[in-house]
Amino acid sequence: MNANTATPSTKLSAERALAAALALGLVWPMLATVVAGVGLGARAGGLPFALSLALAALPLALLWHPLARRLPAQWDGRRRGHGLAFALLALAALLAIARLLGVALYMADASQSQFSAFWFDPFYIGHSCYSAYWQAAELAREGAANLYDVALYTGSVDHFKLDEFMYLPQFVLLPELGLLLGGDFYSLRAAWFGVEAAIVLAGLWALAAYIGQGAGRRAWLLMPLVMVSSPIVVTLQVGNFQLAAISLSVLAMIQFERGRNVAGGAMLGFAIFKLFPGLLGIYLLATKRWRAAIWTFAFSVFYSLVALAWFGKAPFEAFLHYQAPRIASGDAWAFLEIPGLEWVSALNQSVPGAVLKAKALGLDGMTRAVMGTVSWVWTALAIALTLVAAARNASMTRLERAAVWVAVLGLATMRSPFLPDHSGLIAPMWLWSLIAAAALPSARNLALLALGWLACTAVMPVGGVELPELHARILLASAIQAVALGLCVWAVLRKPHALRAGAGHGKSSWSNDDSAAAAAAGKESFFLNTKVVSDAA
């Protein structure tokens, strides 16, 4: 039989059956947590988590067979020739499901802190970024004159210390919707975890499908290694919107590629209120995607008008006259300079944060003014790197283009004066999976990929375990930051394969990228239920 001949696959293989079960297993904790959140809001004491798990399992069980039928038949029989890889990927998926289930239980029941992502660390047990969103929504509902007033964020909810709200007022629309549905802090905290986790998984899944061909299938199989990583799990637990903003931005770019500018604009138009996704807006303009840019701007205006009509002028005036000056002067991050909190520098993955690292190591002259200068220099450099990538957009394969989107988002996040490592390593971890999907399976590449994964998952605890002294922690954090930053810069500056002399020859680190075929076909080529003998996994 000709190697390129495709014949329908009529039998459901063990590989596809297991892949579908494990993929839906990743969905299970997030759906159960949403069910638990609804139960907390509807009933005193909420639903037992075991019941939430059972209820969530019912629709997933119904989806298992249809999903397994749609997964690529190219995987059929692969466990016989790739037994070790098959076992390792299955193990990674089981570990991801187990870790997410544990955190899901903690989200559904705040007393179960032993299931926290870092169960030994009092800081992460009691830290909730979502608490700031919830408090801001409560203040907006009460008509507070200044919902950014730091004095309004000094209390706590149970063992969760209120975090300070620093986003644009339009963002309050999201937590306000939860309050509108009648939820309290605990039910909405649980539901927020489930919804954000679903957005992340949707982004990973959709990007793999967009890439297509063998590279897309490998990216899909690597999803558990992303979902089990500490940047994803810890950020989901604390509820920081950074994770959802990155995923929504990627989902938006996929929609733009498919010509669905309205849907893409609706996503990016909201994600942009986190500010850093605005760098993709520059990418759209540089690639002359005018309709995509216009729809993004239009939805941002629409959301702003909705927020203005809902909350009135007070939040906007408070941001302009109170919060924006604090951000510009650096006062919003004054805690970074408090004596005794130098350890925070070890967690800071931002480029301007390197100034405070240097200060903690004893270098003189590392002032707030220097930090501000570094911020603007990095802003200019990130824009320049984005423009370089945009100029090559037409020559990129789908995998190369996807990697650039994620890398640009990673570079943009590093502009903030304070970027905790769990947030700063999100984009690099996702980018790692795309690089891994393109890499040839040599011993050298596998070793480098293993080291890269370890660096990208290295979220450092604050306490609860014996930690190295401050200087050693800062040096370790700087090495991790160098890896993360290097991945993003490399992905942006790397010349697309089509522009290289002798393209199609050689064994570069990106030689396993066949996603150009998906682009040439002009359609998705991930869910191909056909047997192609010559295809790689």
Image (tube, rainbow, N blue to C red):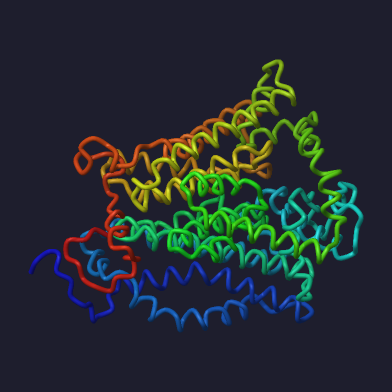
Nearer to me, 397 or 15: 397
Nearer to me, 344 or 219: 219
- Compared to 115, does 63 lie above or below? below
**Where is residue 199 drawn, in percent x and y?**
56, 63
The answer to whether 350 appears left or right of 71 in the picture is right
**Where is residue 176 drawn, in percent x and y?**
77, 66
**Where is residue 374 drawn, in percent x and y?**
64, 27
x 76%, y 60%: residue: 172
The answer to whether 535 appears left or right of 161 in the picture is left
- Quarter of the C terminus within the rendering: bottom left
x 67%, y 42%: residue: 462
Which residue reaches farthest left?
A: 1
Nearer to me, 209 or 135: 209
Q: Where on the picture, by quarter, is residue 452?
A: top left
**Where is residue 387 drawn, in percent x and y?**
48, 38
Q: Where on the picture, by quarter, is residue 536?
A: bottom left
- Quarter of the N terminus within the rendering: bottom left
